[in-house]
């Protein structure tokens, strides 16, 4: 599991740089041909990791219901995100990862509701969910790199 968490941490460091290196206006801009923006992708990444690992394990998530409703699959940005929410996402990028690593070490993930992703991956355990999560984060990071060229 250590390598899975190392990969996730590397991914989160890249995402953090997007938050640091782009203005609030850039984070909120939706380029022509896209249905979302940089900040939505980061919120989506945080929420999906929580849904895949905690929610499907029957455990409370580390993010609010409001955040889930705003960033889950099938949503898109409705209003510009404030600087306060950007700061919250900066914190959540690492707090959620650190807590997940601690929770794995403490063995809290005992049950899992099997789930097949839109891309056809069948996830049977919380560990597999974290492994798939790295793929998911990579896909969205690629989208963000394309968006960054257009803003």
Image (tube, rainbow, N blue to C red):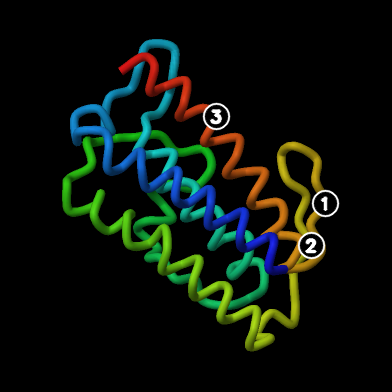
Identify the mark at residue 18; answer none if there is no mark.
none
In primary-sequence order, the first of circles 2 and 1 is: 2
Q: Nearer the viewer, residue 70 or 134?
A: 134
Q: Residue at x 50, y 66 (%)?
A: 97
Identify the mark at residue 114; answer none if there is no mark.
2
Q: Residue at x 69, y 86 (%)?
A: 107
Residues tagged 2 and 1 counted as in contact (Cβ below 8 A) = yes
How far apart in space, not on screen, are marks 2 and 3 (Cα)?
27 Å
User: Which element is circle 3 on?
Assistant: helix
How far apart in space, not on screen, are marks 2 and 1 (Cα)?
7 Å
Residues tagged 2 and 3 counted as in contact (Cβ below 8 A) = no
Q: Position of residue 41 (x, y in %)?
A: 44, 39
Q: Nearer the viewer, residue 113 or 93?
A: 93
Task: Judge the density around disc 3: few (<14), some (14-19), many (≥20) Cα neighbours within 10 Å.
Answer: few
Identify the residue position indicated by label 1 in the image.
122
Relative to 134, is 85 on the left or the right? Answer: left
- Residue 140, relative to residue 84: is it above or below? above
**Location of residue 15 by image quarter:** top left
Quadrant for the N terminus in the image: bottom right
Q: Residue at x 32, y 62 (%)?
A: 91
In primary-sequence order, the first of circles 2 and 3 is: 2
| View extreme (top): residue | 32
Quadrant for the C terminus in the image: top left
Foreground label between 3 and 1 = 3
In primary-sequence order, the first of circles 3 and 1 is: 1
- Residue 26, relative to residue 136: is it above or below? above
Identify the residue position indicated by label 3 in the image.
142
**Location of residue 66 by image quarter:** bottom left
Relative to 7, is 23 on the left or the right? Answer: left
User: Which element is circle 1 on?
Assistant: strand
Task: Judge the density around disc 2: few (<14), some (14-19), many (≥20) Cα neighbours within 10 Å.
Answer: some
How far apart in space, not on screen, are marks 3 and 1 (Cα)?
23 Å
């Amino acid at each position: 599991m250590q390598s899975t968490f190392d990969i996730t941490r590397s991914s989160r460091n890249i995402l953090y740089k997007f938050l640091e290196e782009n203005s609030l206006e850039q984070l909120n801009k939706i380029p022509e041909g896209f249905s979302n923006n940089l900040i939505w992708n980061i919120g989506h990444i945080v929420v999906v990791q929580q849904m895949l690992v905690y929610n499907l394990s029957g455990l409370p998530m580390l993010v609010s219901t409001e955040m889930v409703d705003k960033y889950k699959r099938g949503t898109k940005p409705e209003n510009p995100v404030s600087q306060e929410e950007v700061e919250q996402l900066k914190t959540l990028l690492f707090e959620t990862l650190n807590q997940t690593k601690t929770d794995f070490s403490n063995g809290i993930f005992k049950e899992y509701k099997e789930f097949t992703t839109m891309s056809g991956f069948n996830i049977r355990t919380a560990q597999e969910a974290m492994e798939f999560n790295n793929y998911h984060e990579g896909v969205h990071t690629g989208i963000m790199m394309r968006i960054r060229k257009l803003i």
